[in-house]
Image (cartoon, rainbow, N blue to C red):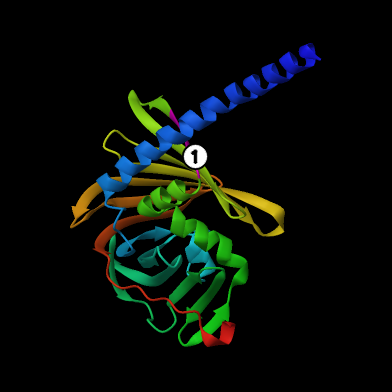
Amino acid sequence: MIGFRIAGLATIAAAACALLPVTAHSLEAVGVLKKASEAMGATNLNSLRYAGSGMVAAGGLAAKAGASSPNGTPLRVVRAINYDTASLSEEITEYKVELPGAPREPVSPGERRSIAFVSGPDAWNLTGTTVAPASGNATERIHQLWITPHGVIKAAMRNNATMEWKTLGGKSVAVVSFEQPGRFKATAFINGKYLVEKVESIVAAPGGREKKAVTTYGEYQSFGPIMFPMQVTQFLDGRPVLDIKVRETQPNNPVNIAVPASLK
């Protein structure tokens, strides 16, 4: 009997030791995420609007809104986010190019502009005045919302993230990983200034498939209470799908995204 008790205690001790690394990594992640939240201004950031111009090739949120181009088209992208209500809108406007690299007037504002929305579990598109349900795109749009530089910090903090230190390019980087249950898994790379440089994520897709996204954020600048990247790129399953230069950022401006009555 004593032998069984000793064996049982040894098993419990071994199990406890096995949990120690995970617990330590989780506690360390909390400290790093708190510093990143403070450095980036995520702590008191409830909503955000930013606009930029560049190229959207195919796939990603823009494709779900019906505004992608297989060959890449100059676009103006405007995103509005409410982190408190888990809501996002993305407006895409296609432009003709009159001078190399210089977007000018919209080709046709009524036909070349579309908006994709998500709010909680509901997703829809708006083209002109026509509302079209897009429930199949809800997971991808939620994914896009929570892998934004500030969104990924907020999502990691509430999803029991773990962390490890890695040396990349000769620099020490905090690698923070977490899962948004039923939606996506993400790993954020946080540099020595506690800014999010990159997010690698795997998002659930229709038919039980998964897609891998790699999103990079560079050229951070100060916009009042927040730091925000001026350059955003994204690859989806190895293909470039987004490359925009941010022109405007408005933190904590009201963003109210209501689910249309026709979808309720």
| Residue 190, percent from left and from top | 36, 38
Residue 207: image quadrant is bottom right
Boundaries of the magenta span: 160-164
Looking at the rendered image, the quarter that the N terminus falls into is top right
Residue drawn 35% across the image and 71% down it: 95
| For residue 134, side relative to residue 114 (left or right) | right
| Residue 237, percent from left and from top | 56, 47
Looking at the rendered image, the quarter that the C terminus falls into is bottom right
Above or below, comparing residue 91 to residue 26 in the picture: below
Label 1: which secondary element: strand
| Residue 181, percent from left and from top | 59, 52
Q: Please, what is the three-letter code of the amino acid marked with disc 1?
A: Ser
| Residue 175, percent from left and from top | 43, 34
Residue drawn 51% across the image and 83% down it: 260
Would you name the residue on which mark 1 appears? 177
Residue drawn 57% across the image and 87% down it: 262
In front of the other: 155 or 208: 155
In front of the other: 139 or 214: 139
Inspect this view and state whether residue 11 appears.
Answer: yes
| For residue 175, side relative to residue 34 (left or right) | right
Whether 246 is among the magenta residues is: no
Inspect this view and state whether residue 195 appears.
Answer: no
Q: How many marks?
A: 1
Above or below, comparing residue 148 to residue 261 in the picture: above
Residue drawn 51% across the image and 56% down it: 143
**Identity of the residue furthest to the top in this view:** 3
Please tell me whether the stretch drawn in magenta is mainly helix, strand or loop.
strand
